[in-house]
Structure formats: structure tokens, C-alpha cells
Amino acid sequence: MLVILLVKSINSDASLWKTFLIAAFFLFIWLWMFFGELRSKTVSVEIGEDKIRIRKYLGIGTLKEYQIDEISGFKISVLRSKGGVYKYLYLMADDKKIAKISEYYHRNYKDLKKFLITAGVRSLGIERFGNLQELKDLFS
């Protein structure tokens, strides 16, 4: 779609800066979807007796396994939108976010959270949701 739009812009009388802005906008959207939504939010989480297995990119990314005792805790964040209020659970290991479990993307969010609590993974409190932090997480 971006290529078609660029070709039409180049062949028309559109100025170069308008073409550049359109290309930059579409590139940003693509990067946000690929590195943000698909990598960090649409993850597959499998919980075994003593392990947590995480696959990013709709569950087809590389498998990362963590022992339950490697998980230092979890933080909760709340996102308010026009569609409703959604909770995120950030799994933490060594002060790094290793997975983002979303009430919006994961039907079994409550079951996953309940398991983590019963497995002894401690709550590290609430992290205030912010667009700037979300943008930082996109590339970390």
C-alpha cells in the first residue's frame, strides 16, 4: 500500500515533503505494529509446573523459558480507552520486562495471574501507564 501511494505521489504534482511525510507516517505505523504490538503484546505464554515459556510475534517467535524462581515479580498497569479499561501484567526478571500479558489480548489473563500468585510470584506494585513509556518499551 505504501509503495502504491508513493508511486502515485511521485507521478502527481505532490511536493516532495508531502511524499516524505506520507512515507514517514506509514513507516512509523508499520514499525509500531511489528515491534510494538506483535512483539510485545501478542505473546504466547505457557505455564508449566516450574517453568514459564514465552513466544512473541503471535506465538511463532523464538521460545524463551524461565524458571518460576527466575521471575522477580510482576507489575500491573491499567490502560483506559474508549473501548473500556484493560489491565496489563508485566512479568519481570532482573528489573527487565520479559513479557506483557494483556487482558485485551489474552482470554486467560485472570487464570495466568492467579497461577502466578499461587506460584509465589510477588506483586511489585502498579506501574502507571504512559505513552512515552510504551514508546520506550517498543524498542527495548
Image: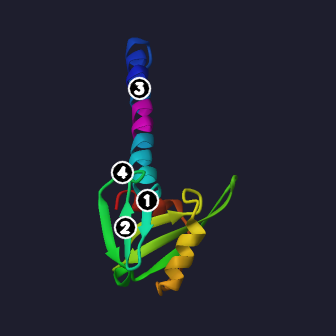
Q: Which of marks 3 and 2 is in front?
A: 2
- Write down the residue under mark 3: 19
Query: Dot 4, how many residues are within 10 Å of its Cα: few (below 14), some (14-19), or many (20+)?
Result: few
Q: Which of marks 1 and 3 is in front?
A: 1
What is the span of residues highlighted in magenta in the rendered image? 21-27
Q: Measure how far apart labels 1 and 4 are at the Cα level.
A: 8 Å
Q: What residue type is labelled 2?
A: Arg
Judging depth in this view, the residue of 6 and 126 nearest the camera is 126
Q: Is residue 24 magenta?
A: yes
> Whole-percent x and y of residue 107?
58, 60
Q: Which amino acid does label 1 sit on?
A: Ser
Q: Measure how far apart labels 1 and 2 are at the Cα level.
A: 8 Å
- Write down the residue under mark 4: 60
Residue 20 occupies quadrant:
top left
Q: Nearer the viewer, mark 3 or mark 4?
A: 4
Query: Dot 3, how many residues are within 10 Å of its Cα: few (below 14), some (14-19), or many (20+)?
Result: some
- Write down the residue under mark 1: 44
Judging depth in this view, the residue of 29 and 43 nearest the camera is 43
Does the residue at mark 1 contact the one at mark 2 (Cβ under 8 Å)? Answer: yes
Quarter occupied by the C terminus: bottom left
N-terminal label among 1 and 3: 3
> Whole-percent x and y of residue 76?
55, 74
Give the secondary structure at mark 1: strand
Q: Measure how far apart labels 3 and 4 are at the Cα level.
A: 35 Å
Q: Is residue 29 magenta?
A: no
